[in-house]
Each structure stands twice: as structure tokens, then as C-alpha cells.
Amino acid sequence: MKNRILTLVILTFSLNTNAQIKGTIINQKDKKAIPYVNVWIENGNLGTTANEDGKFELASAKGSDIFLFSALGYENKVLAFADLKELIELTPKVFELNEVKVASKKKNKELKVGIYKGLKMNAFFASSIKYPNLYARYFPFKKEYKETPFLKQIMPYCKSDIKDAKFRVRLFEGTKNGEPGKEILQNDLIITVRKGNSKPVINIENYNIIFPENGFFVGL
């Protein structure tokens, strides 16, 4: 009886022990580090982002956790705890070119939309391949925007407790259901903000983005 009790105690302790996870995320083809990869645990609220050198760290994880890895330009990857290695390889995506729409850009008229009024946002939080810990604001399309279709700047309201905090800006086309759909940007747009309150001006003019007819989401 004593041996059975001792065995049960040891098994229970092992199943509930948390582990610290560290690793580096690299490109499968050239073995170079991939910066700013989203790393999070499926069906949980624990996640992080790899740094400029592709290194990431999670302070607490369990043997039953499933880890999700997502980065622009790469196939998403799902790994069980037992399959984690020091080097995590992501496979580059092969993009199919969409139909090209040509429009002339006239700079004689500008329009501000979505003027900031408090911190009210359409917030999305999830632990899935599609939406990793996304907070976003929706901007609906209006007929008058046809005269100023190109997106020029984004100015988010930021409140940071640390110096030189970094975050990724993500743009999504809206869907008919009012949710984020296809990602518009295919390159990382990383912004650094100062400690405290700030309203950084993010220039996206060179991306030549036309305001989608179903609206769009700015995600942070």
C-alpha cells in the first residue's frame, strides 16, 4: 500500500510540473534566424514573440501543451511539447500573384477617418493559427472614400510601461461577416514606441493599399 501511494504522488507531481521553454526559430531553407515570430499555446493565454535573432522564451509550459508558430511569409507550424527542439524550422510560403489592379494616385486630397475617441476598440483575442492574440480596430468602407482610396498613415494610441517597446502592425481585409479576413501586408511592419503615452505616425503610403470595400482591420 505504501508503494502504491508513493507512486501516485510522484506521478501527480510530474504531470503538474511546469517547464521553461527556450528556442530559436530559423528558415528551413537557408537556416537563417526569423525575427518576430508569434509563439503561443493552443487554447490558452500564454504566448510570446521571438526577438530580432529569432530567439523566444516561455516561462511556463506543460507536457500536454500544443505550440503554434506563425510568421509572415512562412507556413504555420504546430508542435507538441515532446516535439520541441532547440531549433524550430519554418518553411517559406510560395505566394500566388493576385490580379493586379492599377489606379492612379492623386495627392491633392486627404481624409482622416476613425478619429480616436477613448480606448474603445473591436478587440480580438484567440490562440489559433488565424488570430494569435490580436487586438484590432475595424474601419468600415464608405462611399466617399472612393475619392481618397489609398491608405497613407496609421496613428494608434499606445500606452507602454517599458522603454522602446516593440509591436507588430497587421492589416486585414474585412469579411462580409465583419471579421478579419485576408492579410494585406506581406512584410513585417515593426514599430518601436517610447515609454508612457504616445501616438506614433506609421507611414504605409509606399504599400499602395486601396481601402477594401468590406473595410479593414488594423491589428496590433
Image: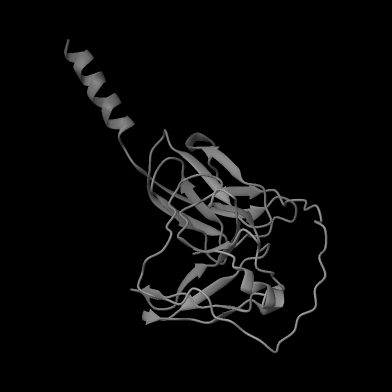
Q: Quadrant of residue 189?
A: bottom right
Image-based side of 131 in relation to 34, left or right: left
Direction bottom: furthest residue: 108
Residue 86 in view in this figure: no
Residue depicted at 62% across the width and 59% down the height? 34
What x and y, as percent, mark residue 98?
Answer: 80, 56
In the depicted view, which residue is nearer to us: 187 or 105?
Answer: 105
Give the number of marks. 0
What x and y, as percent, mark residue 20?
Answer: 39, 48
In the depicted view, which residue is nearer to us: 62 or 175?
Answer: 175
Residue depicted at 81% across the width and 65% down the height? 101
Direction left: furthest residue: 2
In the depicted view, which residue is nearer to us: 216 or 164?
Answer: 216
Direction front: furthest residue: 143
What x and y, as percent, mark residue 215?
Answer: 59, 62
Residue depicted at 33% across the width and 30% down the height? 15
In this rendering, the answer to whether 96 lies above or below 66 is: below
What x and y, as percent, mark residue 9?
Answer: 22, 24
Placement of the N terminus among the 4 image quadrants: top left
